[in-house]
Every structure is written in C-alpha cells, then in structure tokens.
Image (spheres, grey):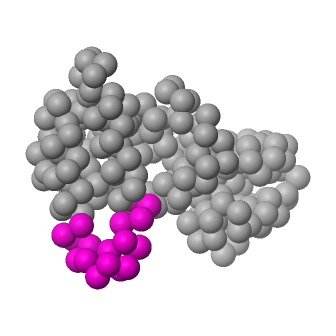
Amino acid sequence: MVSEVKPRGREEIRSAVLTATSALVAERGPDGFSVRDIAARAGVNHALVHRHFGTKADVLEQMLAADAQGVVEAVVQSGLPTRGEASPDVVAELLDLLAASPSYWRTLVHAVLDSPEAALPGTASTTELFSGLWRDSDPDDAVQTSVAGMSVLGWLIFGKFMSDATGADPEDVRRAVAEHVSRLMP
C-alpha cells in the first residue's frame, strides 16, 4: 500500500517513513524489506530516507525509539499502577496494553539479538519501563523485575506460538503469566 499523499517538509517525511517502517516490520519482519520499500510505502524518494535517517538500521533504531515512547505513553495514560504491588487483574490489563504493539516487540527482539548492548539501562524507553515497573527504590527488586520482564516479553513474543504448540487455551496462558508476574512484584 503506497501513500497517495506525498509528505512535505522534514517532520511529515520523518513521520511517514517511521509509520511505513513500522507497518513493514509488522508485515515482513525487520529483515523483509529495503529502504526502497520504506520509501515507496511512505510516498517519498528513497534518497530522502537516507537524507533524513541514514541507513535502514538507523531508520529501524529511530522507529524502535518512537514506538517505545508510544508504549510508555500508553502505559502512563492507562492509569494502571506501575509502582508497588499489582494484582493479577492489573497485570493482565497491562499485558493486553503491551500486546497492542506487536511490531514494536518483534523489532525489539531483532534489535536485542543484533545488538545486545541495546538493553543497557537508559538506552530505550521500554528498558526504563521494565526496569522501573512496579519497582520501588530497593535494588534487591531488580532480580524480580528482570524475571517479571522476561516473563512478559516471553509471553508477548512466544505466547501464541506456545499456546498453539501445546494446545493450551491462550486466555489461560495469559492469566497464568499475569498471576506469575503479580507474585514477583514487591
């Protein structure tokens, strides 16, 4: 699907390219398209993608940062508690909210596999989200928060696959993950 309205100006071009990249990642994965595909989807010349972003890796990095910020904003705007204890129902709501951004999680997996240093604290909005999620200032909470984050990310990435492979009801798996994560929270 190619955009019929040509974006004009730096911000419109950047927005169109990031939107196109996110859609292509959702459809094909981060390795399944080129800068020319991004440009065609965004309705711009491929040279403009290079001019405003650099390489395809740079576009993916900036798309990932923008999508991460969107996930963080959605969590904040939801009003769900992100500090202190969280019931399984609250965690389940958070899981649903996070699951609404599948292309982000898919791109994040590829980014972390390609560049493990991307998970360093402070390098991505969602790294900060997970490192601070339900965590108070106690440094001992970091281990539990890490396990909770891995459980959530595992569910986001492999939940459907594992449910299908084992014949488990996806809703039962979601609920079990929510209960598990809830028990880990201080």
Q: Residue at x 69, y 54 (%)?
A: 17
Residue 105 drawn above or below residue 83:
below
Identify whether 166 is placed above or below 136: below
> Which residue is painted at 35% across and 59% down in the image?
155
Compare residues 98 and 167 and report the one nearer the observer. Answer: 167
Indicate left or right for 4 with 181 as reference.
right
Q: Is residue 12 visible to us here?
A: no
- Side of 165 where 1 appears, left or right: right
What residue range appears in magenta?
A: 156-173
| Whole-percent x, y for residue 112 in the image | 58, 45
The reply to whether the magenta stretch includes residue 123 is: no
In the picture, the quarter occupied by the N terminus is bottom right
On the image, the x and y values in percent for residue 28 come to: 63, 70
Q: Residue at x 79, y 63 (%)?
A: 34
Q: Quadrant of residue 158?
A: bottom left
Q: Nearer the viewer, residue 143 or 94?
A: 143
Q: Main secondary structure of the magenta part?
A: helix
Residue drawn where x is 34% and y is 51% of the image = 152
Left or right position of 110 against 136: right
Q: Is residue 52 left or right of residue 81?
A: right
Displayed quadrant of residue 176: bottom left
Image quarter of the C terminus = top left
Q: Is residue 32 visible?
A: yes
Residue situated in front as seen by the camera: 178 or 61: 178
In this rendered view, identify the residue nearer to me: 96 or 148: 148
Give coordinates of residue 167: x percent, y percent.
Answer: 29, 82
Image: 81 above or below 15: above
Can you say whether 155 is above or below 167 in the image?
above
